[in-house]
Amino acid sequence: MADGYFIPSGHALQVEMSSGIHRRTLGTTDEVMLCEFFLEKDAIVPAHSHKNDQAGYLVYGSVEMTIGGQVRILQPGESYAIPGGIVHSARALANSLAIDCFSPPRDDYRTEAR
């Protein structure tokens, strides 16, 4: 459970979403959600879309990301913005860590973090 406005790191538990893809849902309000994604090398996030706007950046590693048909190899420090409804996918070229924000928050990612 959150401690007021703060979420201790041990309270944001890691969830394996699929093989090689791990998520921690961090701070969340009624309007925005912060998530951490650890992608093992060769992990694939299949093409999908959702109603939520998504913006993020790559902390470390290397990820091939496709957004709306445009393909880029992301390096640490590079960011991306995905409007709701746009199809996107990713492939980890190395062990990688990305931080993403979703607005509105994704109901399927909600946890006790608040």
Image (cartoon, rainbow, N blue to C red):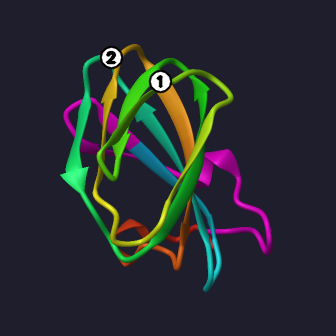
Apparent side of residue 5 relative to residue 83 in the rendered image (left or right): right
Instruction: Identify the residue at horizontal 33%, vertical 71% (top origin).
Output: 85
In the rendered image, the vertical position of residue 8 relative to residue 5, given as above or below: above
Apparent side of residue 84 relative to residue 102 in the rendered image (left or right): left
Residue span colored magenta: 1-22
Can residue 99 be seen at all in this image of the molecule? yes
Instruction: Identify the residue at horizontal 67%, vertical 68% (top origin).
Output: 2
Q: Position of residue 55 (x, y in %)?
A: 57, 56
Q: Position of residue 66 (x, y in %)?
A: 34, 40
Q: Position of residue 65 (x, y in %)?
A: 38, 35
Q: Outermost residue toward the bottom?
A: 30
- Label 1 and label 2: CA atoms lie apart by 7 Å
- Does the magenta segment cover residue 43? no
In the rendered image, the vertical position of residue 46 relative to residue 86, given as above or below: above
Instruction: Identify the residue at horizontal 29%, vertical 46% (top origin).
Output: 69
Q: Position of residue 57 (x, y in %)?
A: 61, 40
Between 85 and 104, the one nearer to me in the picture: 85
Amino acid under disc 2: Lys
| Quarter occupied by residue 31 | bottom right
